Amino acid sequence: MKKLCCTALVFLLLISMAACQKVEQTPDAPVESEQRKQEDKESEAGVSGADEKAALSEKEDDTLKREFNFETKTVMLNSGYEMPINGIGTYSLQDETCVDAVSEALRRGVRLIDTAYMYHNEESVGQAVRESGIPREEIFVITKLYPNQFSDASAAIEEALQKLDISYIDMMLLHHPGSGDVEAYHAMEKAAEEGKIRSIGLSNWYVEELESFLPQVNITPALVQNEIHPYYQENDVIPYIQDLGIVVQGWYPLGGRGHTAELLGDEVISEIARAHGKSSAQVILRWNLQKGVVVIPGSSNPDHIQENTELYDFELTEEEMEQINSLDRNEKHDWY
Ligand SMILES: NC(=O)c1ccc[n+]([C@@H]2O[C@H](COP(=O)([O-])OP(=O)(O)OC[C@H]3O[C@@H](n4cnc5c(N)ncnc54)[C@H](OP(=O)(O)O)[C@@H]3O)[C@@H](O)[C@H]2O)c1
């Protein structure tokens, strides 16, 4: 009898332990069954987790898009050099005005400067860089060959090196398509191999022009610089270029001289600016950065130069980005 009681007690104990275990498992059970359902679905579709991961990493390899680093405020170019994502443009800035503007920008932390043979100010840009006292390798200078230089591009490259007088050129672009552009690009490729230029690229090349140009060159451009602002957005061109692993830079980010008032006074942009306690210019520049477009606003006004650097302490919402995207009018403010 005593033995029978003991057996019954052990039996009861085992049943209650099993019940407890079941209760403890309950919260996880649905997850497990969801997981199983998902696994079943995947195996039905013939896609395992590993397959999915492999497909994803293949996709990542296909997408060469160069992401902006908002901590360092730079982007890694396909040439292996790092370029700041905000800078100063020097179109129409001459002599002392140019030296002062670039010096002011450098003092305020700007490290990217855009010039060109056509701006007649490479000497002034070089002077500001040399006099800044900032280590050369911390500054990134872009210059451009104009089509009237394409027929003797090697000599034009030497001329730019001499005028800038800053040891090497960080980036040289062809200013816009023209007769002899492929040969001029080959001359830039040679100068890049010789270490005279670190990265090379194009300006005012769009999808059609790139499709015919790229198969004729050996080094993929690191950068394409085109007109981009809220009234001329190039929404079809930008992703095309970025998917090739080429960084996009926008000129006339504020619409260009003579057009800035309308753009900066735009009600949609002004409203967004008010919401963030920022200026319209800062909102437009930030909109560019969030689209992965490098900005080089031109200015000789120290307050504007400072303002144009303060782009990293706020973020536009998806809705605000969409609101600005909807302002596109396909309205070009220059001919090329
Ligand atoms: N590759 C090409 O074909 C090409 C063509 C054109 C230009 N670009 C490059 O792109 C750069 C930018 O273009 P851009 O300079 O002609 O035009 P932009 O940057 O669109 O506008 C410059 C104008 O905006 C004003 N501005 C600048 N910052 C401002 C701010 N925070 N608030 C209010 N106004 C402000 C400037 O006046 P203040 O001086 O008074 O600040 C100037 O009048 C050029 O400098 C050049 O380097 C390249």
Image: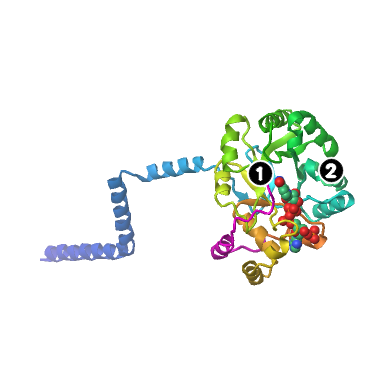
Please determine whether, in this image, residue 121 is positioned above or below residue 213: below
Q: Where does residue 38 sit, x and y in percent of width and height?
A: 32, 53
Q: How crowded is mark 2: few (under 14 residues within 10 Å), some or many (20 or more)?
A: many
**Regarding mark 2 in the picture, which secondary structure is present there?**
helix
| Residue furthest out toward the right | 96
* Residue 112 visible in image: no
Whole-number angstrom distance, CA of label 1 to CA of label 2? 24 Å
**Regarding mark 1 in the picture, which secondary structure is present there?**
loop
Answer left or right for 231 relative to 5. Answer: right
Q: Name the residue under label 1.
A: 204
Read off the magenta span.
Answer: 312-336
Q: Which of marks 1 and 2 is nearer the N terminus?
A: 2
Q: Hey, what amino acid is under mark 1? A: Asn
Q: Quadrant of ligand 1?
A: bottom right
44 and 178: which is toward the camera: 178
* Label 1 near ligand 1 (CB < 8 Å): yes
Q: Name the residue under label 2.
A: 126
> Which residue lies at the image location 30% right of the left edge and 53% below the top edge?
36
Q: Where does residue 10 sit, x and y in percent of width and height?
A: 19, 63
> Which residue lies at the image location 59% right of the left edge and 51% below the top edge?
234
273 and 45: which is toward the camera: 273
Image quadrant in which you'd find residue 20:
bottom left
